[in-house]
Amino acid sequence: MVSRVIPVDPFDLVIFGATGDLATRKILPGLYRRDWAGQIPEQAQIIGAARSPLDDASWRDMVRAAIEENVTPDKRDPAAIARFLDRLGYVPIDARGTGGWEDLAARLVPGRVHAHYFSVGPGLFGDLAQRLHAHGMNDATCRIVVEKPFGHDRASAQALNATLAAHFDEHQIYRIDHYLGKETVQNLMAIRFGNMLFEPLWNAQYVDHIQITVAETVGVAGRGGYYDKSGAMRDMVQNHMMQLLCLIAMEPPYAFEPDAVRDEKLKVIRALDPVRPGDIVRGQYDAANGHASYLEDVESANSLTESFIALKAHVSSWRWKGTPFYLRTGKRLRTRTSEIAITFKDPPHSIFGEQEGQRSNMLVIRLQPNEGIKLKVTIKEPGPGGMRLVEVPLDMSFAEALGPEAEDIPDAYERLIMDVIRGNQTLFMRGDEVEAAWAWTDPVIAAWEARGDRPHPYDPGSSGPEDALMLMHRDGRRWREVKP
Ligand code: NAP
């Protein structure tokens, strides 16, 4: 199977924050890979902007180094790198200043798609929108790409939406949640809505429960300042994990189109019951094995911010009433794994009697590492000697099913940037979705802040605090072991 590269029309992409971590580690290497794959037309240009006093040549040197560091050797072709660097230009701009804007406007080619990627701190999103408008760059061909975090709570998200709306129409605003750009996440929709097999079973009658896990091995060292003001609920649950929950729980949209999909996701967020205090466990990693504790990493002895969260959510809808969604995410856990596991109910009666090998069917959607999908089914153990049952996975790993072409699957940022250029907002969050998600998390956060709750300590390299295990044990269920 040959992966198809669909070329796009010539465009101008401006990256604000062009010297930062996200731009040099993800966005620019990703754009290079799209160019290497032949997707970027010859005339397209990429313009970097930040306060650093660079020129075209010195920014190209920086980007060359970023490619060397972040692109695998098999795709580092000198001719392709030279072609890519040729597209790059740099304009020194302070998002809050007056200089550089006319120069930037003059570099944009009229009539093309102009995409402005806000890869700067969230405090500058409004300034950039305002100045692009003030300098006449918010015309019909203009799009803005807004990074996370989108607000700190509902009120700040509403304020930011209002600021952006003062300068751009909603169809010009692309709020990034890079989890939506992952291949398996989109495959979740293909599996649900492209097959007859799953959808009839996709409801509370047949699904026992759903687990969503985003486990990281790293701590917060290096970005403790940001993280300590945020915590796992704001940093992971309110955006990435709720988006995954929505894609599992939503009704079939009438088409795979931006507003059709986003309308259905919004309905799910609105159908979420408030989380009961007993259904949430917060944790903070301790020191061990030479690793600093969370409190040492954020250099604050009294921080009450959580580096781990586990919670049980209920979607009060006809489809899901009675089927819990268990979410957990944390830092310094045993393995780095992101996955969704859908556990189906047991058959109503086992004709084989009590059998150890018989397990509930489970659909496991692995986001990272090793993106892929497994369906666990029960079969007969091969060989003579009666009917013994065993669980086996039907493995839909992309690498095996699609062969070497699977290695060229674009990463989330590559795909999402190309969607911006094509003008496809399906995998981006709409303003009302973000506000509704905050409306669900705000009261939970306010409640523990009012009580001054201290998160439960947990050992680095573990699966989180004991109480998180109890959250499922008391329902007669278990977390899936997170495996590398
Ligand atoms: P960063 O490494 O601190 O980079 C910030 C960039 O913004 C730099 O290029 C900086 O360059 C520029 N900048 C700062 N102040 C500016 C100003 N007043 N005017 C113009 N440019 C200015 O931050 P980052 O990690 O790349 O993150 C960028 C955004 O992406 C943030 O909103 C972050 O939350 C989000 N994000 C990042 C990641 C990640 O993995 N890094 C992941 C998810 C989301 P100068 O100092 O030269 O101006």
Image (tube, rainbow, N blue to C red):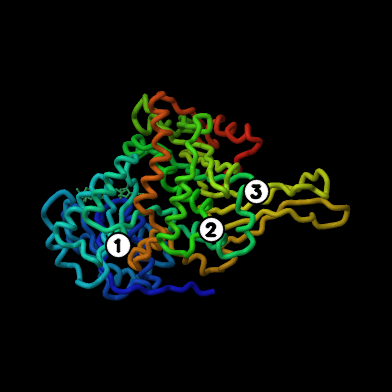
- Relative side of 380 to 110, left or right: right
Q: Secondary structure at mark 1?
A: helix
The residue type indicated by label 3 comes to Gln
Q: CA distance from mark 2 to mark 1?
A: 36 Å
Q: Are marks 2 and 1 in contact (CB under 8 Å)?
A: no
Q: Which residue is label 3 attached to?
A: 205
Q: Is residue 454 above or below residue 353?
A: above
Percent coordinates x, y for residue 184 in the rendering: 51, 58
Q: Would residue 202 be visible to someone looking at this image?
A: yes
Disc nearer the start of the sequence (3/2): 2
Q: Nearer the viewer, residue 115 or 484?
A: 115
Q: Which residue is label 2 attached to?
A: 188
Q: Nearer the viewer, residue 443 or 3?
A: 443
The residue type indicated by label 2 comes to Leu
Q: CA distance from mark 3 to mark 2?
A: 20 Å
Percent coordinates x, y for residue 289 in the rendering: 49, 33
Disc nearer the start of the sequence (2/1): 1
Within 10 Å of disc 2 (Cα), the crowding (few <14, some 14-19, many 20+) is: some
Q: Secondary structure at mark 2?
A: helix
Q: Are marks 3 and 2 in contact (CB under 8 Å)?
A: no
Query: Which quarter of the rendered picture does the N terminus lie within?
Result: bottom right
Percent coordinates x, y for residue 434 in the rendering: 37, 48
Within 10 Å of disc 3 (Cα), the crowding (few <14, some 14-19, many 20+) is: some
Percent coordinates x, y for residue 205 in the rendering: 65, 48
Residue pictured at 60% horizontal, 64% vertical: 195
Q: Which residue is label 1 attached to?
A: 64
Residue pictured at 50% horizontal, 32% vertical: 276
Q: Residue furthest right?
A: 385
Q: Residue furthest front?
A: 318
- Relative side of 106 to 342, left or right: left
